[in-house]
Image (cartoon, rainbow, N blue to C red):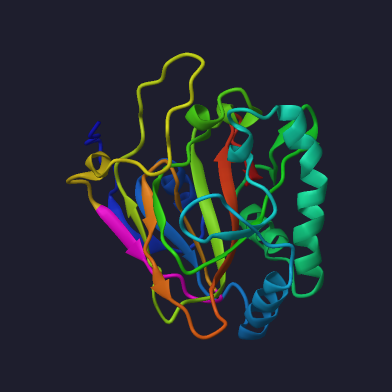
């Protein structure tokens, strides 16, 4: 189903401010970039620590390594209780990487809180925090997909959000390729009660004719965009022994304007 409600007034990158966060959550601008978020030394140490961490791989054709956990893995046939029980181990795995480098998750949350006039914290379910800050390493492509909790995870607390962003800090970049394309075609699928629509490997017709924004991951920077827009990552070429090493999570706006993070 093609969606034509393009809403951007600016298809450019903007600095992190409260107003730009609001505009991005409302899907009025394409992206926010925090330039120079980390030093070259911090990037090097983080990438090295990640490569020595507890890296697992998704069961997809493209080789995508990760440390931590993603809530979407629990959408269909695993319980909320299992998800919350697995959070401490996932947090310990990423904190081991932080201990050997630095903590970009805490730094991002501090930057968001400095800009946003409401509380910034982890998403919570019955008082228990979600995991946030999944580390990824790949030079392969990531297919066209959408992340939108009200449809993806309607039975979780995050299903109540009214805007969703994704942030990524890049510790190591590719020699070529690996750019992310965001299509201004906000996802609004038909939903059958009791079913969760497919959100990965979407049909190209979904973004046909839609404006798009493309960014290259630059080591040391954080890029934030609205994940309700279909987005994809192109394959790239890594330096010998290198990869596209990043860490990120989602940022959701709750009805009371709090920002909550989860992966």
The outermost residue toward the left is 209
In screen coordinates, is 145 left or right of 254? Answer: left
- 213 inside magenta stretch: yes
Residue 240 or 225: which is nearer the viewer?
240
> How far across and how far down the image is residue 228, in percent?
42, 41
- Locate the N terminus and report the quarter of the image it occupies: top left
Residues drawn in magenta? 212-220
At horizontal 43% and vertical 82% (from top left) the residue drawn is 175
Can you give x and y, in whole percent of width and height, for residue 191 in the image? Answer: 41, 20
Which residue is rendered at x = 25% and y = 35% of the image? 5
Residue 90, position as x, y percentages in the image? 76, 51
Left or right position of 20 against 124: left
Q: Using the rendered view, name the quadrant where residue 7 is placed.
A: top left
Residue sitting at 28 percent across and 49 percent down? Answer: 9
Question: Is residue 191 shown above or below 39?
Answer: above
Q: Residue furthest top?
A: 193
Asked whether residue 45 is drawn in magenta, I would say no
Residue 39 at x, y = what percent? 63, 81
Q: Is residue 241 above or below residue 67?
A: below
């Amino acid at each position: 189903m093609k969606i034509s409600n393009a809403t951007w007034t600016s298809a450019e990158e903007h600095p992190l401010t409260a107003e730009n966060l609001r505009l991005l959550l409302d899907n009025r601008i394409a992206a926010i970039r925090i330039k120079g978020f980390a030093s070259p030394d911090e990037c090097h140490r983080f990438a090295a620590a990640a490569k020595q961490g507890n890296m697992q791989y998704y069961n997809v054709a493209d080789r995508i390594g990760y440390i931590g956990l993603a809530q979407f893995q629990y959408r269909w046939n695993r319980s909320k209780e299992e998800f919350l029980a697995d959070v401490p181990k996932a947090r310990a795995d990423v904190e081991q990487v932080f201990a050997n480098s630095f903590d970009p998750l805490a730094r991002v949350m501090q930057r968001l809180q400095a800009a946003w006039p409401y509380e910034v914290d982890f998403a919570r379910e019955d008082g228990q925090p979600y995991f946030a800050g999944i580390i990824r390493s790949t030079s392969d492509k990531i297919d066209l997909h959408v992340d939108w909790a009200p449809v993806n995870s309607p039975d979780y607390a995050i299903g109540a959000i009214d805007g969703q962003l994704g942030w990524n800090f890049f510790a190591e970049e590719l020699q070529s390729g690996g750019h992310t394309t965001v299509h201004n075609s906000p996802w609004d699928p038909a939903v059958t009660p009791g079913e969760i629509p497919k959100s990965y490997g979407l049909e190209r017709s979904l973004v046909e004719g839609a404006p798009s924004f493309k960014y290259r991951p630059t080591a040391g920077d954080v890029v934030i965009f609205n994940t309700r827009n279909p987005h994809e990552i192109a394959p790239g070429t890594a330096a010998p022994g290198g990869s596209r090493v990043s860490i990120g999570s989602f940022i959701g706006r709750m009805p009371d304007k709090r920002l909550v993070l989860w992966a």
